[in-house]
Structure formats: C-alpha cells, structure tokens
Image (tube, rainbow, N blue to C red):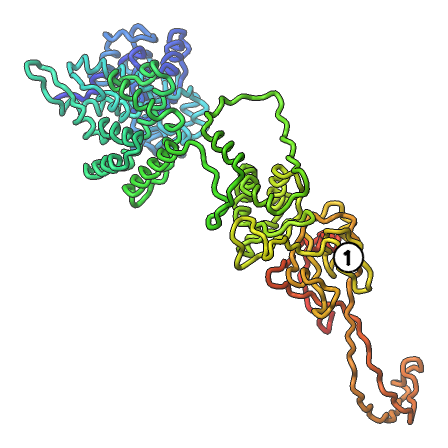
Amino acid sequence: MTTALYRRYRPETFGEMIGQAQVTDPLMTALRGDRVGHAYLFSGPRGCGKTTSARILARCLNCAAGPTDTPCGVCDSCVELSRGGSGSLDVVEIDAASHNGVDDARDLRERAIFAPARDRFKIFILDEAHMVTAQGFNALLKLVEEPPEHVKFIFATTEPEKVIGTIRSRTHHYPFRLVAPAAMLEYVEQLCAQEGVQTEAGVLPLVVRAGGGSPRDTLSLLDQLIAGSDPVEGSDTAIVRYERAVSLLGYTHAALLDEVVTAFSAHDAGAAFAAIDRVVQTGQDPRRFVDDLLERLRDLIIVAATGEGAGAVLRGIPADELERMGRQASAFGTDRLSRIADLVVGALDDMSGATSPRLQLELLVARVLAHTGATATSPAPAVAPASASTPAPPAPVVERESAATESKRPEPEPQVPPAVEAPAPVTPSGPVTLAQISDAWPEILQRLEPVSRSSWMIATDATAVAYADEVLTLSFRTQADVAAFKKLAAGKGPSEDLRGAIREVLGIRVKYVARFDADPPVGPSAPVEGGEPAPSAPPSAPPASPSGGSSGRPSGSVGRGAAAPSVASASAAPVTEWAVAPIPTDPTDPAASAATMAVGLAVDDEPEDVSAAPAPVRTLTMPREEVESPAPSAYAYTDDDAPDDDEFPPPIEDAPIPPRAPVAVERTAPPRAPRAGGIERVGEAVVRQVLGATFVREEPYAPPTRFN
C-alpha cells in the first residue's frame, strides 16, 4: 500500500511551491521583515496549494528559529507539521463545510482565549471558508477584528466573494492561480524521474492537459497512469504507454487527428468520414473529438506562424511530430487554418446541449470539406450570369478577348497609389440606341455587382425593351421585382445603382419606365415588336389638361396626374423621384394617348420646374322629385310658449309651392384603383410629397355621433 502521489510530494516550504510566485514572494518578504498580519485569506481554484501554503505559513511562524521564511524542519513544530507529521495542538484546522454555524463560532472564540500550549502562536486554519454562514461570520467578527496577540487566522476558500465584506476587509488577501503548462510539464518530468517511471512520447502533455493547471489533479492522474503501467523487462522500472493514456484520459489518438487533418488538406471526403466513423465506433465522445481537433488546428496555426520556433511554444511535442505538423501546416496555410478553426469553434458551441452530437460532427466535416474545396478550386468568386433563364447576347469581340486576357493575367501585388481618381464616364459617339444598351448590358451588370449585390440580383431579371429620349423601358417578370427596383432609402436603391452603372459604361443618365410583363421578351434587352422602341409616353406632346391648356411640362416628361398639384415644383428634394403617369378620367376622351391608356407606368427623374394643371372636378346633377307638402295647420300659442317673431315667421296661407329645380353638386373625383401592371403609391411619404405636409402626430378616428 502506497501513499498518494500528491501527498508524498506535497511542498513543505515556500521554495518548493511551483507557479505561485505572486503569493510566496510577498509572504517570504513579510516573514523576513517581521511584518506578519493577524489574518490571511487564501483564495483560488481547487488543488492549487491554498491549504498547503497555510500549513507552510504555520510552520514558518511557529518554527523554533522563527518567525522565518524557511522552516528548519528539525524542531518539534516543524516535524509535527511536516508531510507525515501527526499535527500540532497549537495549529487547529477546521473544516468550515461542517462547522459553519453560530455555535461553532462560539466554540472557536472560547478556544482562542487560551494561550498556546507550546508554540509561539495559536493558528486557526478555516478550510472552505465560503461555507460559513453569515451568522457564523458575524459571530467571529469581533475576534477577527481584534484578536489576542497569540492568535492568527488563515481562511482558505475557492469563492472569496462569499466571505462577507467585514471579514474580508480585515484580512490580507492572496489570490492563487492555476499553474502554467510549461512549469507543470517540467514538474511532472522530475517526479517521473524520481519515481523511476518511463513514459512514451506524448503521455505527459496529455496528463498536463487533463490536469487543467491544478497540481493536485495532475498528480492524481499521473499516479493513476503509473499504477496501471507495464513493467519493463529486465529492469525494475515501469513504462506508461501512449495508447493506454489516450484511452484512459478520453483524448483522441494523434494518428486519428493526423488522418482527419490530412483528409481535409487533400479534400478527401471518404477518408474524412471513415475517420469520423471510427471515432463513433470506438465510443469516443464527439464533443471531445471536436475539442481535440480544435487543439490540433491551434497547434498547426502556431507551427505555420512561427516555423522553426514552434518547439519553444509547443513544449513536450517530439521533434518528428513537429516536423509532420509543419508539413500539414504548409499544405493549408495560415488563412485556411484560421477559417477552418472558426468553423470548428462554431460547431463546438452548437454541440453543447445538442441531442445528436454525432450529426453535428458529420455536418461539421461536410462544411469543412465544402469550404476547403471551394477555396482550392475557386480562389476568386466568378461573376454570375445576367439571367438564369435568358442567356446574355455575345459581347463585342474586343471586349471578350480583353476579358479573357485579363483573367489569365496574374494578379499584381497590392499597391497603395497616392491618389485614385474616379474614372470618367465614357461618352459614345452619336446618340445611344437600344442596341448599344443591349450590347453593353453584361458590362453594366458587371459594374453593378460590386456596388450592390441586391441591386445586381434585381437588375439581372430586368429586360431593356425600349429606349428613346433618355427614357429606358425595363420589363420585369413579377410585380414584386418592379416594386423592389423602385424602392429607395435615403435616396439610394436599385434604380439609382443601375443608373450609376449605366452612366459609367455609356456616359448617359437615363430615366426609367418599369413595368411587369407576364411574357417577357427573350434576351436581356430585346426590342418590342416591329423592332422600334416603344416609349411609354409621347416625347413631345404632354397630356392636355381638362381646361384645354397644356400642363406646361417640357418634352420627354410625364405628369403626375389629376391628384398632384404643383407641389413637385415647390419641393427642392422630393421624397421619391418616381412620378405616376396620368390616368384619364374618361375612356372616351380623345386627348388620352394610347401609350398612357395602355401603360400608366412610372418614370423617375422628372424636372423640378413642373407646373401641373389644377385637379379636374366632376359635376354630378341629382334631380329631386316633387313632393307635396302637407297643408299648414293653425296652432294656438299660449303666452308662455309663444315664439319670437324672428324665430318663426308667420305662415303664408294659400301660397303655391313652386317646383324644385335640379341641384348641381360639385364633387371631386374619387380615387381610382390602379390598373393592372400600374403603380399604387401609398404611405406617409406620398402624403408629404403630394400635400407638402409635415407629420405631427397620429390620432384615432372616431365616427360622429349625435353628441359630437
């Protein structure tokens, strides 16, 4: 029967402590200068040396040669407080988890009154001090605040915030921390050498990783592995095998991690999923495998970044494994490794609490393979075609050859020029025709894509069907595409983005007519029947007003219709640039043009100096039937209820009732429903634009009653 490893190697002096210099150095300095306090609070994670440090401090205070920072180890007090000592009467260790009440605090106060039996101080060590109740701490408060000269308190806890503030403020607080992996690895190597135990490569790094920085947990795991180690033939030593350590600690074998990483680098889906199947069939936790894979990716990133200096960062890894990891890192590159690590981190977060971790693991492998494959095959995204169902017309030979030459040309190194000016728009010689717009449409879409992806997606489904007088007619497949194309936010939207792309390519600033066609023409910009462009409105003859006069609009613009007074000319910055073509009030009106009757669409970018005709008024004649009035009857008034003369005039007897003539009632024309394919403009923005109104507040509508 042997003693546990962490008990056999428990430190007896502050010099034997590892990884806690922030605590040991000031304590030793205070002991040398005889500036020791009356109460201490040691806090930190479990197994990091809090209770051990409290015993060492007690040895230093009660040593026969002390107080000293290094106990002699031979006096009675030092021997009794050593690893195998029986304990001292003047050093009382109390488990606060089971002695946390008011009665226990009273018992401690009674014991503290008496002087120490032999040593210099009577020291009380309260382990797990956070378990003491608030009433128990309050019972100890007076004693801790003003203890006798021979009493010292040492509180050890993993949760210092649970110690009440009145106690914590009267102590010297020393925080303990977890030990760094490098210091812990060196420490366990020394212990294995003292124990005469050999370990295969990679065993001790796994032990240090499983210990999590806690010396006690690390030594417990190492003790378990040593107990199950195989004896070496012909010697008294034992050896700890890597396979046994991996299976016992639950980590993924390095060979399996290498297989998965190699499959990722080679984009071998079969090998990757075969390795995942072995992970599941061996009963390994998928979450632990993903955690190990993330650890390996982290090591590969370090190897790719540091190169030959990776051994100084990744301690405990053999040289041959570092060389193999260097080859894997060069196959990926730092950027790809970082992106894959991001995918693994996201999968690890999703697997916490997941009901099917195996499914999450397989989906992770599929995403990594798709990502690595897309990165390896297409380093730069290709430009999407102009339309999914309608092929684009061939571009000119010169432009196609130049594009092919530029695609084969290697990308130059990025340089920062001192000043970059925007390219001037290309002005074509002569007027621009629909055929030129059709030929330049692929280039226009290519210019539009980097500006706005959403605008590019809307424009790819548009078909240019006519162009005349700077008015470009676009046909869309659905009414939703028309609405999306016309949508503006802060003066920006798909229509403005497309207008800018057209201006960059052709050097013209167009206006739009957007409409919905159930059967769009073939090709991105095919002309209408007859081969001639069909403008949506007559370019030279504006619609006449009901009064017979002209609306006053210049050629090429379309009026807003009957519902728009001259607000557009008064507003310097209208809410939207879309204007609705007039819908005739009478289908038989000869002044209504065929284009206006058929389309009723929208043209944007109209001039600001527009004077609209007054709104037409519809006159409705309502004849009334003659109704015979009843004969007047005499009524005798009393003095009390007699009306005034000006209230009721005297009746006219035998007066003939003239027939009532028809009454002419003038009423404004009610709003008409938009035609099929037309535009319905509603909302607060339209009210502000048309009426020039300013929003103040909203009030609920209450129908009139007899009382209001």
Image-quadrant location for residue 262: top left
- Estimate the x, y position of residue 33 in percent, counting from the top left: 41, 7
Image-quadrant location for residue 197: top left
Image-based side of 585 in relation to 23, left or right? right
Q: Name the residue beneath numbered marker 1.
A: 565
648, above or below 617, in the image: below
Residue 124 seen in the current view: no
Q: Residue at x 60, y 63 (%)?
A: 676
Q: Which quarter of the image is occupied by the C terminus?
A: bottom right
- Estimate the x, y position of residue 401 in percent, counting from the top left: 50, 33
208, above or below 624, in the image: above
Q: Nearer the viewer, residue 653 or 74?
A: 653
- Estimate the x, y position of residue 493 in percent, counting from the top left: 60, 45
Q: Nearer the viewer, residue 281 or 25?
A: 281
- Estimate the x, y position of residue 637 in percent, counting from the top left: 89, 89
Callout 1 amino acid = Pro
Q: Nearer the viewer, residue 573 or 129?
A: 573
Q: Residue at x 41, y 21 (%)?
A: 173
Q: Residues within 10 Å of mark 1 (few under 14, many from 20)?
A: some
